Image: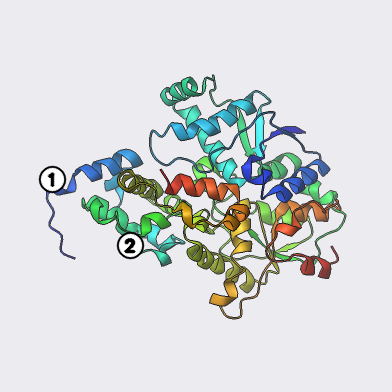
Amino acid sequence: MRVRLSGQSVHNELVRRVEEYSGQDLMACYQCGKCAAGCPVAFAMDMLPSQVIRFVQLGLVDRLLDSKTIWLCAACQTCYTRCPKGVDLSRIMEALREIVMFEKGSYINYDAISPRDVMEWPQQAFIGGFRKYAV
Amino acid sequence: MKVSYFPGCTLNTTGKGFDNAVRAATAAVGLELIELAEWNCCGATYPLIVDNMLELAAPAHVLVAARNQGSTVTTACTTCYNVLKRTNKFIREHPDERERLNAFIEAEYQGEVEVKDILHLLRDEVGFAAVQEKVQRPLKDLKVACYYGCMVLRPPAEVAYDDPDHPRSLDDLMTALGAMPVDYPHKNECCGAYLTVSAPEVTREMVYTILKSAQLAGAQAVVTNCPLCQFNLDKRQAEMAQFHAGFQSLPVFYFSQLMGLALGLDASEYGWERHYIDVRPLLNSLGL
């Protein structure tokens, strides 16, 4: 992938928002890859967790907004627990979800939820899921 | 010992059997749980966006109710524990935000209450040795895989009372009850949590990895302390054989159910009917 970088493109408005929402030092990451290696959902992701933060560092947040990865992070905090630089990647994922839902509304489709699911799901799955995937 | 108890939404509904077992088993070892006179949902996730004060209001409200009733509050729901523990730490360490939050919920709360997971209290206040003395029917010959999930372990600096990489509290409790915990590497790996509502097929594969690992270690059953993990590990097995030929199902218990059984208590209200994988054949084969 060929990317043209400049000071302006790296410090764009979307990067600023990710930084503000997540409260993380984005440049702290030196791409060791521990987050991707330990992520239990990486097998289902279209971009690895380490790639997500790399794209943010390069000012390419717009390319992350269509990725499946940000919706598959379950905030289990395995990456944060192992990160040698103390970056909480789950907060960056949440910031990206917020940016998308701010533009497009809820990610979860309420109509697809069956009455049987409503009876079966633990309350915490409902509430947690809706908090993560709905505005 | 008396301690304030926050059941939370899940233990009040789909996890009622877990709740019944927790109350009975703790009472049997001298830990009296006094349910909070007034409580609300904790919010079920700790907000990860900076300055998201609104989502802290619900757990803060629970903490205020707990403060009004005693010095320590406990819960058996690992998610509630995680949310309350982290919120309390945030309130203690951020005076400016604390002031705004207090103004919003119309309270004066500085983080006075101690939030402790029920397993933590059983380990440190009651003691597993004391639990062992009360065992009537040891879980002899039960090879069990203890599964901790995420919420009592991560982030370690905020919530852990156990080694986040090699947790032992559940294993030690099971040993005290006479069971044989197996060692396997996935005891602290995420089961998918609320992905179960948005990507059940992904959750299924995560559950498969965990259960297969437990089976390779010789486990006959899984035991967990998290109601959402219990649901995922149990429910997702129903369709597992379609995707993984030859998959053999494993019953998934709550620790309190096994504790109640081992203590010789009446286990009829422990929610067995809500299990997706029938636990009775295994219990019958063990004479429990």
Q: Nearer the viewer, residue A33 or B103?
A: B103
| Disc 2 crowd, CA 10 A, few/some/many (<14, 14-19, 20+) | some
Residue corresponding to mark 1: A8
- Asked if residue A84 is positioned above or below residue B108 in the image, the reply reads below
Tell me the number on the disc at residue B101.
none
Q: Position of residue B104 (x, y in %)?
A: 47, 23
Q: Could you tell whether B141 is left or right of B48 in the image?
A: right
**Pointer 1 chain:** A
Q: Residue at x 62, y 55 (%)?
A: A120
Pointer 1 and pointer 2 on the same chain: yes
**Which amino acid lies under the numbered mark 2 shown in the image of this protein?**
Met
Q: Could you tell whether A39 is left or right of B30 in the image?
A: left
Q: Position of residue B16 (x, y in %)?
A: 71, 47
Mark before the other along the chain sequence, 1 or 2: 1
| Disc 1 crowd, CA 10 A, few/some/many (<14, 14-19, 20+) | few
Q: Is residue A110 visible?
A: yes
Dot 2 falls on a residue whose secondary structure is loop
Q: Position of residue B183 (x, y in %)?
A: 63, 65
**Pointer 2 chain:** A
Image quadrant in which the N terminus of chain A is located:
bottom left
Image quadrant in which the C terminus of chain A is located:
top left
Q: Could you tell whether B144 is left or right of B43 in the image?
A: right
Q: Dots 1 and 2: beta carbons under 8 Å?
A: no
Residue corresponding to mark 2: A47
Q: Nearer the viewer, residue A80 or B82?
A: B82
**Which amino acid lies under the numbered mark 1 shown in the image of this protein?**
Gln
Q: Residue at x 13, y 45 (%)?
A: A8
Q: Residue at x 83, y 67 (%)?
A: B284
How far is disc 1 from disc 2 in space, using C-alphas? 25 Å
